[in-house]
């Protein structure tokens, strides 16, 4: 096999790994060869043991099918560095993935070129992380993977979803994006029955079932996925209401809190309003403590009682 052919086949394999399905014409265009050459290269990949499926017809679609073993992944320098750093810092908000991430990292670093090892080490030494015991719900990696594939392939899913009041219904959705906020993960999807965009917490999703039907991607109205989810979450009803008028600029508060997004509204150059409403009283207390500024609070009686009791315990503990 000539060096030119080898390079072309490696490029072909890399393309097959980036998308679920390619037409012969698209591959030929990307590789600057004829469709006939693509067919020959596909046959050579099959001879080497790569499970490449093809669809009959004029378009001649190809895809890298699941096999008995995971085929080698081809990564460029930036992808390799990103994966290595992500594996080293893995597992925030995910259950049971720490040991698996370390095994994968060991395999990757064993074959990293020396020039990339230096980049990974530099990035890692420049970053620090604090691991807290997670009290809230954690996402299932298998569920996360299923939803990620559905988002990538624009494939309709059916799933069971349990609402905040405990009722469970079967939903049919077009997955669009996964969004992480703190320790929680959300699926942004278009609900086909309600004909509207919906946000689903991953810890409340069960029995996701791919339908095999792929649809053209819908255009999200007006903004990017993270901002869309933040806006919807800030407008969603919560169990406890807590609104703080803070004696600090909005930018100052935003820099010292996370996950509040549009829930911080400037009133003037020196004050802002923060919507700290939530379903859990300790979460509200955590938000208010993180403000690091004086504030006036308009809140439900249950919120005020919880804050008073917390303050009294703190005072007793400090004598």
Image: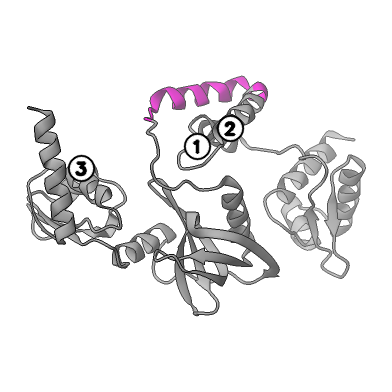
Q: Can you give x and y, in whole percent of width and height, for residue 79 in the image? A: 58, 38
Residue 53, located in which quarter of the rendered image?
bottom right
Nearer to the camera, 195 or 267: 195
Label 2 sits on a secondary structure element that is helix
Rendered residue at 53%/36% (across/down): 82
Q: Can you give x and y, in whole percent of width and height, for residue 187 in the image? A: 49, 60
Left or right of residue 26, residue 266 in this image: left
Left or right of residue 143, residue 301 in this image: left
Residue 56, located in which quarter of the rendered image?
bottom right
Q: CA distance from mark 2 to mark 3?
A: 32 Å
Q: Can you give x and y, in whole percent of width and height, for residue 8 in the image? A: 79, 43
Tell me the magenta residue range: 110-130
Mark closer to the chain start, 1 or 2: 1
Label 1 sits on a secondary structure element that is loop
Q: Residues within 10 Å of mark 1 (few under 14, many from 20)?
A: some
Rendered residue at 50%/48% (across/down): 139
Q: Which residue lies under the disc numbered 1? A: 91
Asked if residue 274 is among those painted magenta in the image, a careful observer would answer no
Q: Residues within 10 Å of mark 2 (few under 14, many from 20)?
A: some
Q: Which residue lies under the disc numbered 3? A: 290
Q: CA distance from mark 1 to mark 2?
A: 8 Å
Q: Can you give x and y, in whole percent of width and height, for residue 203 in the image? A: 48, 54
Q: Which residue lies under the disc numbered 2? A: 101
Nearer to the camera, 302 or 287: 302
Q: Are marks 1 and 2 in contact (CB under 8 Å)?
A: yes
Nearer to the camera, 164 or 244: 164
Where 300 sits versus 100, above or below? below
Q: CA distance from mark 1 to mark 3?
A: 24 Å
């Amino acid at each position: 096999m000539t060096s030119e052919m080898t390079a072309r086949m490696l490029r072909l394999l890399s393309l097959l790994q980036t998308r679920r399905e390619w037409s012969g014409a698209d591959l030929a265009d990307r590789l600057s060869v004829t469709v006939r050459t693509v067919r020959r290269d596909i046959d050579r990949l099959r001879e080497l043991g790569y499970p490449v499926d093809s669809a009959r017809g004029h378009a001649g679609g190809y895809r890298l099918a699941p096999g008995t073993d995971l085929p080698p992944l081809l990564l460029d320098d930036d992808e390799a560095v990103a994966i290595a750093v992500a594996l080293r810092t893995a597992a925030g908000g995910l259950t049971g993935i720490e040991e698996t991430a370390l095994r994968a990292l060991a395999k990757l670093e064993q074959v990293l070129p020396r020039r990339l090892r230096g980049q990974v080490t530099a990035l890692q030494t420049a970053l620090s992380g604090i691991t807290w015991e997670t009290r809230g719900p954690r996402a299932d990696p298998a569920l996360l993977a299923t939803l990620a594939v559905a988002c990538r392939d624009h494939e309709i899913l059916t799933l069971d979803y349990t609402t905040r009041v405990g009722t469970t219904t079967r939903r049919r959705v077009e997955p669009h994006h996964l969004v992480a906020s703190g320790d929680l993960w959300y699926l942004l999807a278009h609900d086909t029955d309600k004909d509207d965009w919906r946000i689903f917490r991953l810890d409340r999703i069960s029995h996701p079932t791919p339908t095999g039907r792929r649809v053209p991607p819908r255009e999200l109205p007006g903004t990017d996925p993270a901002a869309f989810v933040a806006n919807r979450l800030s407008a969603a009803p919560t169990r406890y209401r807590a609104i703080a008028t803070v004696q600090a600029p909005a930018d100052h508060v935003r820099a010292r809190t996370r996950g509040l997004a549009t829930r911080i509204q400037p009133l003037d150059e020196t004050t802002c309003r923060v919507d700290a409403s939530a379903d859990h009283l300790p979460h509200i207390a955590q938000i208010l403590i993180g403000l690091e500024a004086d504030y006036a609070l308009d809140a439900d009686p249950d919120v005020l009682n919880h804050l008073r009791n917390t303050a009294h315990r703190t005072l007793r503990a400090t004598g």
